Amino acid sequence: MAVNYNAKEEADGHPSGVGAPGGAGKSRKPDNTAFKQQRLPAWQPILTAGTVLPAFFIIGLIFIPIGIGIFVTSNNIREYEIDYTGTDSSSPCNKCLNVSWNSTPPCTCTINFTLDQPFETNVFMYYGLSNFYQNHRRYVKSRDDSQLNGDNSSLLHPSKECEPYSTSENKPIAPCGAIANSMFNDTLELFRIDNETRIPITLNKKGIAWWTDKNVKFRNPSGNTNNLTALFQGTTKPVNWPKPVYMLDSEADNNGFINEDFIVWMRTAALPTFRKLYRLIERKNNLQPTLQAGKYSLDITYNYPVHSFDGRKRMILSTISWMGGKNPFLGIAYITVGSICFFLGVVLLVIHHKYGNRNTSADIPN
Amino acid sequence: MPLSGFKFGKKKLKEEERHLQANNRDFNLEFEYANNSIKTSKYNFFTFLPLNLFEQFQRIANAYFLFLLILQLIPQVSSLSWFTTVVPLVLVLTVSGVKDAIDDFNRHKSDNHVNNRPVQVLINGRLKDDKWMNIQVGDIIKLENNNFVTADLLLLSSSEPHSLTYIETAELDGETNLKVKQALTVTAELGENLQKLTDFNGEVKCEAPNNKLDKFTGTLILRGEKFALDNEKMLLRGCTIRNTEWCFGLVIYAGPDTKLMQNCGKTAFKRTSIDRLMNVLVLVIFAFLALMCFILAIGNGIWEHDKGYYFQVYLPWATGVNSAAYSGFLMFWSYVIILNTVVPISLYVSVEIIRLGNSFYIDWDRKMYYPLNDTPAQARTTTLNEELGQIKYIFSDKTGTLTQNIMAFNKCSINGKSYGDVYDVAGQRTEITEHTEKVDFSYNQLADPKFVFYDHSLVEAVKLDDAATHGFFRLLSLCHTVMPEEKKEGNLVYQAQSPDEGALVTAARNFGFVFRARTPETITVVEMGETKVYELLAILDFNNVRKRMSVIVRSPEGDLTLYCKGADTIVYELLESSCGPLKEETMEHLNEFAGEGLRTLVVAYKNLQEDYFQEWQKRHHEASTALDGREEKLSELYEEIEKDLMLLGATAIEDKLQDGVPQTIETLTKAHIKIWVLTGDKQETAVNIGYSCNLLHDDMKDVFIIEGNTSEEVLDELRTARKKMNPDSFLDSDEIIKFENPSTKSRILPEEQANGVYGLVINGHSLAYALEGNLELELVRTACMCKVVICCRVTPLQKAQVVELVKKYKKAVTLAIGDGANDVSMIKTAHIGVGISGQEGMQAVLSSDFSFAQFRYLQRLLLVHGRWSYIRMCKFLRYFFYKNFAFTLVHFWYGFFSGFSAQTVYDQWFITLYNLVYTSLPVLGMSLFDQDVDDRWSMQFPHLYEPGQQNRYFNKIEFVKCVLHGTYSSLILFFIPYGAMYDTVRSDGKAIADYQSFALMAQTCLLIVVSVQIGLDTAYWTAVNQFFIWGSLSLYFAIIFTMYSDGMYLIFTASFPFIGTARNTLSQPNVWLAIFLSIILCVLPVVGGRFLKAQLIPTVSDKVLRKIRAAKKRPPPPLPKTRLRRTSTRRSGYAFSHQHGFGALIMSGRNMRPKLPFTTTGTFSPNSEKNRHK
């Protein structure tokens, strides 16, 4: 009820004792502070030719070299990629195309390839998936972080978010949820073919996950025993998995929830096309490149079906640089933006010279 | 609002007639009349929470968020955690709730203050002290001098003769002169006899409570006899008792039923044009939101059908979802939740905060503080600030607003000699300044110390016993209806009915002709120290037709003289032919006075023959007792005797303008604000003031005067005027037919340009015709082409109608400024009402949105505060919409890459905190401190005001620009991180293209980009701005590093899943390279565009900025004010400003006490004193 009546003013608003400034009571004169009088000291930048034009040129001049640097760096990265999905009937993996989870014996296939140039530094082996929506909202939230963090009550009572993968045969699933359930489980092995002999290349499976993930975010359940089987007592394996989580690896510090392959998978990708670190190939000595040029063969234990939803699977070998993996985008973008800036700078300069002075002298009505 | 509904719902029937009996509470209680307690508060302790929440959820934004909250509780739809909505909503509700609580607490306090005032009430034969709120209808209460009237009372008796009671009604109608109320004789007999008063059992039947201040009808039934009651017997709440020792009254209406409270009514809730635009925009945004969600829902349907269906091996459909279409339907709502930030709830809170802040600046402004009566400016409505920057029309009252309503005796012409100017040694007329030597009146002990005069020659003339001069001042001291009051000897106070008369009598007093006392038959004057008692034989009173008044007195020497003063045109007709040469000289002086905007009067006298007068007096007595045609007979008699007068001279009274009025009007005119003066004064006076305050000037091509007496004449005059101003605009009699149909009511007329500067003066009666349906269009078209419009003799209602007219036909923001109760209607009607907190009471201020003490502060209010508020609000809105579109649309783009699954791009905490924490302070800082040029330059270049009037800084086009800008930024903000992340890895080969890193990168990009953008928008970087912007950025990093830390994760595992993302991602060079690239891409086009715009099509403010930059200093302080003097000649047709004289009252002696001249009781109103102070 907007009543425009202020009873107090009826009483006090009456012009009382007029003409007595500084009389009884304190004056209502506002304080003379810079804040109240809106006189705060201030810096008042405005866009002038003197600041804008140099800015364009400087940005142009900075961006172009950076862009070239990035581009060259990116181009120097060695990268080799094999699509082993097997959709092509000529592909050796074509026979495994319609494989299902848990098929025994597992379908295996071998792809031979040749590296034309040696990979000098450490090589990183990735698996890549395409058309795989790891960023789907329902997929992303289908996990229980408390359970993965080793919380014993969550282990036995997985969060509702994991539905429909929270229980199986009336037992709680560990790890629960769609992400864990769909864990990538192809096995990739790499051999160098040297005069018809297959020399296996050592693939390091540790050190592929973030340190924080491995040491803080993921923890096995705690208990009196170190025996993982006992700790996971009362839970069951995810539906799609052939083995329970405590049998992912033989080594104790890479088993259970802290299995690095598992951790890497659980870090869901932002885009439907992604690659995930699979193995490390460390450079052994300074005399030989990590992977010398030559023939290689990739043995695949094909467990992971992607054909039903048009997914693709890739194996990628890559070296890296200070700015990560191969990505020409940034370099090209920097060069382009730098050039455009420079060009715009020139255009603005011309415009400024032609029209800018015309207006400065224009009169302002006073 | 809902509360009033409850209240009135309780009342069983609408009251049709009020029936009450004095001293009979039991009888009166039957009717359940309201008692005298008032309640303006809305809540009490227990109802606050439910009622306040109920009210708050009536606001669209809050209801919308409640709806979102409910949506989020549906598991299939919920795409965000509950806290993303709850936290902002709770915050918003709390802030508004606290504000409402404080407001209501203050109302409670003031209610209590008023309700607990003491009053004496007659109960069981004894006077008892009680509180106001306990007074019931039918009680008899006693009021004493200077008391506020407690309720609407029927006056029963008073201490004064004839039970007269003087009241001041300033609170009620703004008039400062005293009014007289008189009780019925039958009740006056009660006196102060408590026993009689207790036994008084009169019954009153009267009309139901209403808001008509000047009307009351009822009957008093006493001992079977009926007595008519009217307004003359009523004392209304809000008045103050003056000059009356005590009085008794019977309570008729109490509390909320009083006329004062009934008049306060509900105020129409004013909204600014930006508010209205914002409402439209919010609807547009809703539509836009629905469209986006629809697109995404369709996308989801298709995706689920094409891909999601097959992807079920890894991600089964949610329970209950069995078709792609249903999934799409659910996704529509999920996206409504996610994209809700395009309609940001914090917008409304921020807007309120900004307006409040800018209102405080008005309250705090020392340059709008008036030291003389200790009045700072006040923003009474805190929600209209930015509209102050868009005013196109100002409607101003004259008296008390443009003028001070103080009349100063400024000049005079006596016997052909002009006095009042000051000449220097060389004989040149000089300007009167503060340093000019004032005339010393110390020789006269009865002189009024406040009276100021500069011309010494007049004192010399008086001292030299110049007969004409003495005659002149003797006339001034005798011919008037002023009442003197002398509480202490020598301390004379005059109570004049019009300030002009007061000024004249005071002048005579200072020059040695002191009007000291009067009785019905005599006037005592101290003439040059010698007391003389004149016999007052007749007062020939003033009225609007006669435009003069005369008195007939007999001097102690026995001479009979008629003294007359009046309007020059009238009195000149009555002069004796022998005055010829003097007439001409005086006429010259009159022209000169009038040219300076002074109000002139001509004074004359006539010696009467004893026998003629005796005979005349006899006829006069007969005429005044005649039963029919009394008025005509009297005026015939007056005319008969008022002829062949001898001219004495002329007086010139300055209707003092408020300080700085001409300068202010000049500045406002330069800002292309059209000023209309709406005054109750006569045309001549109004035109004169128009010239003296620079509204009208001789450079104008023409000043049209509309004074037709029929609607045809008015139409004709209006059309002739318009034809002259712009012949092209005249389309033969087209509109008049078309617009007779009132249904086509709100047509916005286009601006029409006149071919020069014109003024328009329109008279009250013509205005009445012009405001009639079919002529109003003509009036608006003609009047709006003129630069200045003066409406004379308008009633308060007409004032409101004129404002309404412009509001209706012009897309313009109007401001009304006034100081009196007669301005209230117009103040309430206009978009913005400004009250002058001057001497005419508080009514105007109480209903105004802004108030200050002087008209000249208006230019600061508009050109500085209004302009800044407008600029700030527009900048704020532009930025706010931009930042939210940039923020929200990223989700839209991400939809195409995440299966339209309503996946958010950012961390949920970021979404929660974005508007509330990360970006709120910088934009608030800008909206509270920004100024393009400082206050002096703003006043120096009134042209800077124009963009506001033309609504240029925020309108639909600007909004579309913001949306496009936001869309562009969102594209950059999504695709640069996308490109940079695509298939890439960290410098140690580990993952970086994961969802969490991508989210972090996108949100960091976004935050830095919007921070840089606010930096670009900020024109005035104070330390606070720096602190807010840098602080917000630092806070962001501090918060993400905290939230993504190990500790937080281990404590609240489920809430902070982003552990480690900050340190793993922000350590990567390519992330920073991508961030940097996004910033440049988002910001450079803006910089380039603004630079180009300033180069190619510079606005006024661009030019001014450049000029200031060149000058690099503050403008010089304004030049000292010079008195504007016009050389042109104007004819002043001034007469008295009052309607009808006190003459009859004086002659009847009704208002006199028996023991004059020195009375001891009662203090006379300090009003006349007050007026002269300023």
Image (cartoon, grey):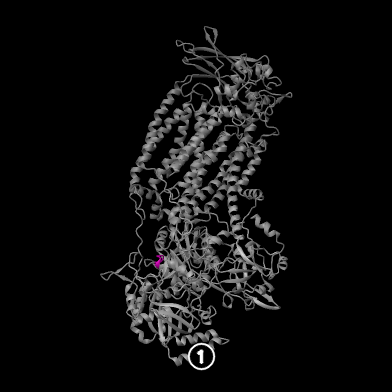
The quarter of the image holding the C terminus of chain A is bottom left
Q: Position of residue B60 (x, y in %)?
A: 61, 48
User: Residue A98: x percent and y percent?
Assistant: 65, 20
Q: Which residue is mark 1?
A: B618
Badge 1: chain ID: B
The stretch drawn in magenta includes residue B695? yes
State the SS at label 1: helix
What range is drawn magenta here?
A: B692-696
Q: Looking at the picture, does residue A198 appear above or below residue B364?
A: above
Q: Which residue is at 59% across, 17% downward?
A: A90
From the top left corner, tell me how far across and down residue B391 is, in percent. Answer: 47, 57
Mainly helix, strand or loop, the magenta region?
loop
Horizontal relation, residue A225 to residue B480: left or right = right
Residue A302 visible in rendering: yes
Asked if residue B212 is positioned above or below residue A186 in the image, the reply reads: below
Q: Residue furthest left?
A: B426
